[in-house]
Image (tube, rainbow, N blue to C red):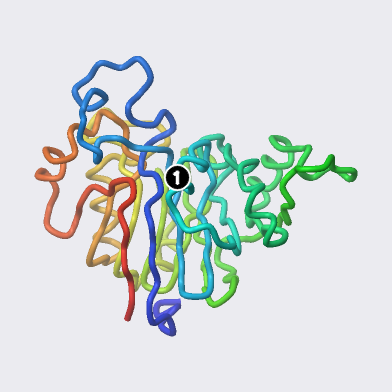
């Protein structure tokens, strides 16, 4: 799928959240990042919105979804792609209720994440649902098997979040990956030809058992061959945005909440 999505004339990606599971500022923290007044140092939990003229998708729907979506135009959500079922990535699913006035919202997850969501939100999938619960259609997808939603073709790619297999997503020449620690060679091959990459990088140092650091993300971006790389899923240990950004090599930058990427051929 090296040239997947070449039919897209324009696609807009909005970074709704670029923070790690605690968000930034971290509750009760007095560090200079958490006390910063720079909007780029304030990070909600990770999520993106991918849009063409006709189709709107979310990748993940975390506990900050309501706050993230309020500034956006109110129109149909055509699908939600789940990376994995940890709370910081799916904890806002109940808040999609207002969008169900447009019809059922289809949610796509791998078998592990699908099981996790059934356990986390059983009332949304009960046989006899009480009035007002979100109308969700839960669909199982697998890495390496493309799907199409509206006019957007998506290729799920498996990465490892520690020992947990989760999904990243490729949309033509753009890819979004979060919570990755490692990736198998056959899955890396599915990302060849990606030009713009958004990928997780927790902090500069102090290794983590299930997340990449900045150097790991930069090496990964080089392996993919991305021309532009934006680092996401950042914790407060990354440092102040303007200082941390200055430490990064050409072609690599810190993502920030509300950032918009206009992507086209």
Question: On the rendered image, what quadrant is the C terminus found in?
Answer: bottom left
Q: Residue at the location (50% across, 60% down)?
A: 157
Determine which quarter of the picture holds residue 94: top right
In the image, residue 95 above or below residue 6: above
In the image, residue 90 above or below residue 106: above
Q: In the displayed orientation, state which residue is furthest to the right.
A: 128
Q: How far from the left and from the top, in percent, is residue 66?
A: 52, 41
Q: How far from the left and from the top, in percent, is residue 148?
A: 59, 73
In the image, residue 119 above or below residue 141: above
Number of numbered discs on residues: 1
In the image, residue 159 above or below residue 208: below
Q: How far from the left and from the top, in percent, is residue 128?
A: 90, 43
Determine which quarter of the picture holds residue 138: bottom right
Determine which quarter of the picture holds residue 132: top right
Q: Which residue is mark 1?
A: 68
Q: Residue at the location (30% across, 35% down)?
A: 42
Q: Residue at the location (40% across, 80% down)?
A: 3
Q: At numbered mark 1, what does the secondary structure look like: helix, strand or loop?
A: helix
- The reply to whether residue 86 is visible in this rendering is yes
- The reply to whether residue 166 is visible in this rendering is no
- Residue closest to the eye, 25 or 113: 25
Q: Say left or right for 32 vs 153.
A: left
């Amino acid at each position: 799928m090296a040239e997947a999505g070449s039919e897209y004339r324009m696609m807009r990606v909005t970074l709704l959240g670029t923070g790690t599971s605690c968000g930034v500022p971290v509750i009760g923290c007095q560090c200079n990042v958490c006390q910063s007044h720079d909007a780029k140092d304030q990070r909600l939990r990770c999520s993106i919105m991918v849009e063409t003229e006709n189709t709107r998708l979310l990748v993940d729907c975390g506990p900050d979804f309501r706050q993230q979506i309020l500034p956006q135009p109110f129109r149909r959500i055509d699908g939600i792609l789940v990376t994995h079922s940890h709370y910081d990535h799916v904890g806002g699913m109940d808040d999609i209720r207002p969008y169900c006035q447009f019809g059922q919202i289809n949610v796509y997850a791998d078998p592990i994440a699908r099981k996790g969501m059934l356990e986390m939100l059983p009332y949304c999938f009960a046989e006899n649902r009480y009035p007002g619960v979100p109308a969700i259609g839960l669909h199982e997808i697998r890495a390496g098997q493309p799907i199409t939603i509206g006019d957007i073709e998506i290729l799920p790619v498996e990465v490892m979040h520690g020992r947990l297999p989760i999904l990243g997503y490729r949309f033509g020449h753009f890819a979004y990956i979060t919570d990755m620690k490692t990736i198998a060679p056959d899955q890396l091959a599915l990302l060849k030809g990606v030009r713009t990459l958004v990928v997780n990088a927790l902090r500069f140092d102090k290794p983590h058992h299930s997340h990449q650091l900045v150097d790991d993300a930069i090496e990964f971006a080089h392996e993919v061959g991305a021309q532009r790389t934006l680092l996401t899923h950042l914790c407060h240990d990354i440092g102040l945005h303007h200082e941390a950004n200055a430490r990064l090599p050409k072609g690599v930058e810190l993502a920030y909440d509300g950032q918009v990427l206009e992507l086209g051929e």
